[in-house]
Every structure is written in C-alpha cells, then in structure tokens.
Amino acid sequence: MDKKTTGSWLIHHTNKLQGITSQEDFKNTFLAGKSGILLSAISANAQMSVNKERLEVLAKAANISTMFELPKLLEVLKNQGLIDISANGGISVYGVTTAVTLQHTADIFDALEPSANESASIALAERASISPVLTTDIREEISDTFKLSSSDTAQLLLQAEKIGFVDAENISKDDKLLFNGNLFRRDTTKKVMSVMDSLKADEKAQLVELSEILKASACVPVDHAKTLLGKTLFEKVTAIGLYDISIVSNSKEEVGYLTLPSAFSKFSNSMIDDAFDLAKAFVSSITYGMTKSSYVRGQIQMVDQLLSALVRGESVGPVQAIAEDYKVLELKGVVQVHTGTKKGRTGPMLKLLKKEVGELALQAIRQGDVSEHSLTSLPTAAVTTFNGPETNREVSRRTQAANNPKATNEMLSILRTGGGI
C-alpha cells in the first residue's frame, strides 16, 4: 500500500475515532490523522504564513481543540519539518498538495511507531474496500501478517466494526461479511455490474437511468434519485456506497445530492482526492453560485473561465457574493477571501489556495453538465455547512439496517465472489 493510500485510511479512521469517547487503542492513528487534518486546513500549494487568529479558526473548523490538541499537533508538524512557529503564535507552512499531505500523514504515523493492531486496522480497511470479505477468510490473514494472537485478532475485528473502520453484515451465526464505504471509489465497472446482476429487471433499469443522468450531470438532487429508484432500492444502494450523498446546508434548510464515488477517478485516485472531501465541497459551492446566486450579487455565468483563472493563480472578483458563498471552502483552507481592486472596483476577492482541488472541480464540470437542472434544490442562501459522503452513508446504513438487516446481503455476497479485482 502506498503512502498516499495509507494516509487516506488514517484520515478515514481518525474521523471515525472522533465519534467515540476513548482513542487509546488507536492513539497513534488518531494523532497522525489529526496532524494530517490540521496540515490540510492550514496549507496551500505555495508557502504561506498563517497568523494565530486564522490558525485557531481553521483548527476549530477542523474539530481540533485549540487548548488541548492544537499545541501537540503543531509540535508534531514542526518536528516533521513542515511548519515553523513564530514567537507571536503564528506559523509558516511549507507548500503541499493534498496528495503530499497524505504522504506526510503516513510518515507521521510511521514515526510514532504504531502498534501491530493499528497497522492491521489500516490493512483490514483496505482489504474490505477492494471487495467484501468474510471474517473467517480475513482473520487468519490479519493474524499471520501482523503476528497477532487469535484473541487480539478477534478483538481487532470487533473494534473495527464498533468504531466504523469497516461495516459488517451478519451472514450466519459464526460469520460476517465486512466492507466499507470505499467499495466504489476504484475498479468500479466490474463491481457495478455485479450489483446489477443481483437486482430485478425493473431495479436494474432504474439504476441504469440514474447512471445515465449522473453521466450527464455532476450531481443529482437526492429527492430526484429517491423518486426514480424508490425508497427501498435507494436505501440498499446508498448503504453500500454505490452513490455518494453530500449535504449542503445553511440557516434556512438542508439539501442533499448524489455524486458517483468515482467521480474523479478519470483524473486521479478518487479515494485520495476525496480524503478531505475538498473537491466535492468545491463543486457544490461553485454550482450554488451558478444556479442560485443573482446577477446583481455575482452570479457565476462563465464557470470554465472563472475556474481556469483561479487555477492559474489569479484572484477573481470583486463581487459581494464572494464574501458570503464560500465560507465552507474558507474554513477548509481551500480558498482565501480578501479585499482587492480590479477594473476600478473594490470589494471581496477570491483566491484559490489548493490548485489541485480547483483542477479536479474544473475537470468534473467540463465532463458533466453542472447547469441549471443539476442542482435546482440547492439552498437560496449561502452554503455554510458541508457534510461529506461517508457521514451520510453512515446514516443511510443505519436506516437500512434498522429497516431490513438483510437488504444488502445479496449484493455484498455477489461483490465478494464476482466483484473483486
């Protein structure tokens, strides 16, 4: 497993660990993952300075305690030679891309000398993302590879399920089928065909119709997808991660939309680029600016030209919408909003800090038709919150499991035998 993939799993595991009361058994995983999350939030492609106030805002937005966690994480990043800390509490951050951030996250993990149990949890998640695997098949493999006793392996499998490193479907009294939400981020075609083979003819036709819509559009409103598929089929396919659900919200409402997990796989490794949900958050904000923002406040009318300018390193604006519509991207460290002057006008300007995120958004918009019909349900006020696909898949998974514990068994079993690579 390369370092970028390892780093992606560390971020994935850390996000899961934040939902439990104690991370002691995975303390190195948690520290490395939190360090990577902070580095992503504070860094850009070019070296930059971040004052203490901005540093604390970005840390809080990344769910990092400024009193207890931030000092330790800064120390870790400094020891890795990634930042310099000034006397006034600000920092200087060396330029890194998302992929390089993940490599550094893996390096930090290695430097912390993780336990065999922690390394095994990464390998387990990777294996369960390739195709669903039976606990009886993976138990011996994990035990032999990482020199774990039978009891330690059993405990790891239990913890992985409880924390959410993997999902589990009961197959029999003594066996479970393990998988996770990254099943459809790579090697997609064969897996999708396997899912199709498990469905009835009418269900297959419904999925084909939705797939055709997604090929033409970068995203589809959740309500439209539910209407097309019906509640039962929608819950089955979203629970196993066949589609990503992202949520954008503001003070007035909360709206979801679907994208393909492999949306960026034409251009790069979707799992790596989705590790921080940056590209999909960027596409959602840009789409809002195209579909809902009025001309007076700065409606985006030439999105290709706008994104191309941002990717070239130019600042765009000034328009008032910039000060209001990109708060999520500001808090994720993707863009910077500043006051500037252009063509005789002064006001809010937008600058892209993470070039590769803008490049992915530009490619996705060029490949799919992100236009008026794509996201007609987006809020009419500025987007201020973005919940990524894995968070929403967990909700779908819990709902589906509560309603029908065996609803996805057939699809997962077929993926295990026919969808693996």
Image (cartoon, helix red, strand yellow):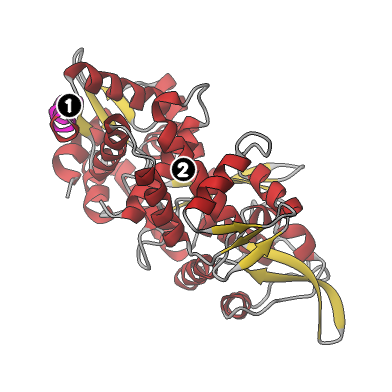
Q: Which residues are magenta?
A: 135-143
Towards the viewer: 163 or 212: 163
- The residue where tag 2 is placed is 33
Whether residue 47 is visible here, answered yes or no, is: yes
Amino acid type of the residue tagged 1 in the rendering: Arg
Q: Residue furthest front?
A: 87
Asked where in the image residue 414 lies, by quadrant, the reply is top left
- Taking 240 as reference, is 221 above or below it? below
Residue 5 x, y percent position in the rendering = 33, 52
Quick check: marks 2 and 1 in contact, CB under 8 Å? no
Residue type, mark 2 in image: Gly
- Relative placement, left or right, of 205 versus 14 is left
Q: Nearer the viewer, residue 399 or 7?
A: 7
Residue denoted by label 1: 139
Is 265 above or below relative to 175?
below
**SS class of the residue under badge 1?**
helix
Residue drawn at x 32%, y 42% is 202
